[in-house]
Image (cartoon, coloured by chain):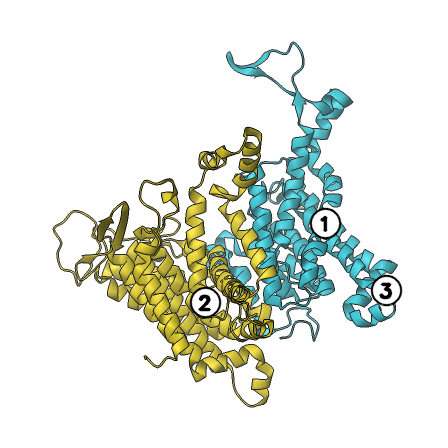
Chain colours: A yellow, B cyan
């Protein structure tokens, strides 16, 4: 179906089910129970899952397929965000133009940067993209303030023209909507002790993410995708056989940038505020982490990586000292204090420390990311021959 | 004319920091072939060495019978603490030691940084020689985050002012020296010292590589590792020590930079991005190239910050280094002084 083989169809259906049922799956604990703090099924977080999923899928098309490590991908996300907010300000509060234009703007931006950066490869490519992204960040935060809102950020306001919307009497700043369906609208369903929230904005993100995932599968399986994999394996050989890799690389870079722009457009559609810090290189580093953690070069990996990091970020950041003391109160006093002292640096504001440690562990011991880890555990549980699992591990994940 | 001299001088102190960090990066890259994204963190740790020493030196006790401090009749409740160093060495010497804590930190930072460098290389980076460059970048990037967060946990997120010794507070009238009107070109003493210090350190590293047997072996190992290994020389051990030295160079750059810019936990990352640009502009693997590019880009940045230039091209001071890097990479792909065959993929 849809031109996919059975295995890809399975992963598409798997992602579709994950996305559709996320409000239920992410709220496994009854409301009011002590474990409810681990629930993630609220709209804001779910939207971020889907949006960063798109961002990571796009980055994976570049890094996973061709091995070109871009350290400036956040610039495209930022460019898309600004374009999206401007559409919401100038054209209409409807999100569709914002999403489309932000994708296109990021694509053009990626084309320009790609034309220059792709003249080099390896570490030089990483540094060139990093330099461009830092330039974009520095300009957005300072000189381009009339366009980008500088350090305060760009947001919608009451007196925006919005030429397609006509006059509005309301004295509130309108919230982004899809033909009148506001992004913040939610329906709540209560089953027993469980409270599930189905949010309009989330489902729009989810649909876009699913389409993005489908396109990514098609790219992976297409002749174009094979060519990109060939570039990763041995670019010299391609050159010697008379294939010019530049157009393929450029197309790949632009597609990847457009995914980032799409994510940016969706981000401002959910919350119409774009700030320069979105383009900073730490933001670029974050998407690299997501893809590596999930498994670069695999289809499902980036989605899992994005979800995992955003979930952990959210949960770990919420834990504070008193929560920890609550957990360890079952131990004797001295030991409880000791455990709190050990764990405390890793939670709350120290979430980045956990992220760094986790990231190092993954790069050192599990270069294929969570997907490889899953395969290893899977083959260990089912007790299949070692040979077979080794073969599977070499075909799917990238190094 | 005076503007030009002033901007060159202004560029020198930042350029010194860039040159020192880029020198360390190039040393690591040239010897071990590893792209070290954690090098900025080493610079930052160096800066925090001086903060730490300052804190250690000012640990104090409350003398018996001391009265609560009061300013204008308001009592602060606690009596003033007297640092132990004043108790041990007498008041004048003790105060001088605290005052000179930043230069003293050099002695403190060298062993600490070498130890950190050696542990880093033996414990982590050793296992990444055979892995692709992307993996090296990623693991050192993770390490940089970890080091940064550890410092943030212990020292907080705010900048920590670390003043220079009183003798170096104030400015030097450079214009008067070359026959201009006094007061036209004035330049803080500490920045002059920083520049001189950086030059001395750079010369020390070059002399070490050039005139010692150890340095000769290291250079031979950089040129052809396999042959040197076949001659029965333990290249790995020497390269590990070079990693420690590179870490110490970055650390010392950080120590001496603290009075210029109060250290905070993300200063390393801010410098790292630019230092990479410096290394690439100078030519990957070329030590003189890294130093030259460091000073050139520092001076370029300070020229771009002149008011006249900013009025002409707004925002150029923010991006000039990156622009220069892009132009250089596209016109001279090997950088200013890069050699053929180094990282040409």
Q: Which residue in the structure is indicated by mark 1?
A: B248
- Subunit of label 1: B
Could you tell me which residue is drawn at 83 percent across and 69 percent down?
B228
| Nearer the camera: disc 3 or disc 1 | 3
How far across and down, in percent of the image, does residue B176 sit? 67, 43
| Nearer the camera: disc 2 or disc 1 | 2
Quarter where residue A207 is shown: bottom left
How far across and down, in percent of the image, does residue B48 sit? 63, 41
Could you tell me which residue is drawn at 51 percent across and 75 percent down?
A66
Q: Is residue B297 above or below residue A214?
A: above
How far across and down, in percent of the image, does residue B61 sit? 66, 20
Instruction: Tell whether label 1 touches label 2 (CB within 8 Å).
Output: no
Q: Is circle 2 on the same chain as circle 1?
A: no
Q: Nearer the viewer, residue B209 or B127?
A: B127
Mark 2 and mark 1: Cα distance apart in space: 36 Å
Q: Residues within 10 Å of mark 2 (few under 14, many from 20)?
A: many
Q: Is circle 3 on the same chain as circle 1?
A: yes
Q: Quadrant of the N terminus of chain A?
A: bottom left
Q: Which residue in the structure is indicated by mark 3?
A: B233
Q: Quadrant of the C terminus of chain A?
A: bottom right
Q: Secondary structure at mark 3?
A: loop
Could you tell me which residue is drawn at 75 percent across and 51 percent down?
B201
Q: Residues within 10 Å of mark 1 (few under 14, many from 20)?
A: many
Q: Name the side, left or right, on which A191 lies relative to B292.
A: left
Give the mark, 3 or 1, whose residue is nearer the N terminus: 3
Q: Is residue A75 above or below residue B344?
A: above
Q: Secondary structure at mark 2?
A: helix
Q: Which residue in the structure is indicated by mark 2?
A: A59
Mark 3 and mark 2: Cα distance apart in space: 44 Å
């Amino acid at each position: 179906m849809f031109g996919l083989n059975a295995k890809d169809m399975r992963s598409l259906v798997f992602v579709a089910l994950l996305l559709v049922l996320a409000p239920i799956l992410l709220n496994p604990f009854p409301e009011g129970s002590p474990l409810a703090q681990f629930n993630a099924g609220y709209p804001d977080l779910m939207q971020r899952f889907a949006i960063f999923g798109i961002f990571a899928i796009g980055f994976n098309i570049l890094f996973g397929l061709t091995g070109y490590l871009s350290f400036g991908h956040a610039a495209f996300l930022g460019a898309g965000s600004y374009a999206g907010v401007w559409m919401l300000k100038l054209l209409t509060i409807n999100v569709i133009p914002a999403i489309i234009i932000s994708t296109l703007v990021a694509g053009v931006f990626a084309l320009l940067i790609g034309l220059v950066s792709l003249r080099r490869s390896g570490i030089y490519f990483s540094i060139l993209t990093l330099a461009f992204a830092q330039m974009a960040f520095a300009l957005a935060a300072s000189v381009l303030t009339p366009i980008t809102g500088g350090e305060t950020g760009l947001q919608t306001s009451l007196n925006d023209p919005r030429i397609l919307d006509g006059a509005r009497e309301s004295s509130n700043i309108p919230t982004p909507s899809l033909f009148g369906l506001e992004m913040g609208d939610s329906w709540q369903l209560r089953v027993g002790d469980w409270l599930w929230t189905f949010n309009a904005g989330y489902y729009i993100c989810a649909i876009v993410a699913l389409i993005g995932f489908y396109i990514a599968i098609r790219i992976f399986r297409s002749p174009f995708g094979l060519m990109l994999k060939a570039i990763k394996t041995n670019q010299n050989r391609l050159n010697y056989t008379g294939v010019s890799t530049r157009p393929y690389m450029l197309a790949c870079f632009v597609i990847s940038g457009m995914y980032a722009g799409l994510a940016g457009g969706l981000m401002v559609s959910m919350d119409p505020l774009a700030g320069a810090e979105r383009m900073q290189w730490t933001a670029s580093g974050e998407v690299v982490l997501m893809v590596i953690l999930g498994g670069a070069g695999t289809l499902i990996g980036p989605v899992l990586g994005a979800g995992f990091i955003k979930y952990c970020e959210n949960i770990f950041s919420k834990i504070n000292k008193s929560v920890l003391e609550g957990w360890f109160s079952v131990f004797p006093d001295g030991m409880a204090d000791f455990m709190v002292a050990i764990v405390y640096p890793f939670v709350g504001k120290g979430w980045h420390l956990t992220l760094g440690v986790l990231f190092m562990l993954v790069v050192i011991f599990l270069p294929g990311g969570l997907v490889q880890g899953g395969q290893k555990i899977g083959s260990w549980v089912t007790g299949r021959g070692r040979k077979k699992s080794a073969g599977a591990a070499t075909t799917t994940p990238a190094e | 004319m005076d503007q030009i001299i002033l901007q060159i001088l202004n560029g020198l102190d930042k350029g010194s920091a860039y040159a020192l960090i880029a020198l360390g990066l190039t040393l690591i890259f040239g010897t071990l072939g590893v792209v070290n994204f954690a090098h900025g963190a080493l610079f930052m740790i160096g800066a925090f060495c001086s903060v730490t020493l300052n804190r250690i030196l000012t640990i104090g006790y409350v003398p018996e019978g001391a009265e609560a401090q009061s300013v204008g009749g308001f009592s602060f409740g606690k009596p003033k603490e007297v640092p132990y160093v004043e108790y041990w060495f007498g008041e004048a010497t003790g105060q001088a030691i605290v005052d000179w804590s930043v230069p003293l930190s050099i002695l403190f930072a060298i062993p600490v940084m070498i130890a950190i460098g050696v542990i880093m290389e033996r414990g982590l980076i050793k296992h990444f020689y055979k892995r692709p460059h992307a993996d090296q970048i990623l693991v050192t990037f993770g390490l940089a985050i970890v080091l940064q967060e550890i410092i943030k946990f212990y020292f907080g997120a705010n900048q920590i002012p670390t003043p220079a010794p009183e003798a170096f507070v104030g400015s030097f009238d450079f214009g008067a020296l070359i026959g201009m009107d006094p007061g036209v070109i004035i330049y803080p003493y500490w920045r002059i010292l920083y520049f001189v210090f950086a030059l001395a350190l750079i010369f020390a590293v070059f002399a070490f590589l050039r005139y010692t047997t150890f340095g000769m072996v290291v250079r031979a190992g950089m040129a052809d590792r396999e042959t040197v290994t076949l001659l029965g020389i333990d290249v790995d051990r020497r390269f590990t020590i070079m990693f420690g030295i590179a870490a110490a160079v970055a650390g010392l750059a950080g120590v001496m930079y603290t009075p210029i810019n109060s250290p905070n936990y993300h200063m390393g990352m801010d410098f790292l991005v630019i230092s990479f640009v410096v290394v690439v502009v100078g030519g990957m693997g070329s030590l003189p190239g890294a130093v030259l590019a460091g000073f050139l880009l520092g001076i370029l940045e300070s020229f771009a910050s002149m008011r006249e230039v900013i009025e002409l091209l707004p925002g150029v001071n923010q991006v000039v280094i990156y622009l220069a890097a892009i132009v250089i990479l596209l016109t001279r792909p090997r950088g200013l002084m890069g050699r053929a065959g180094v990282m040409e993929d």
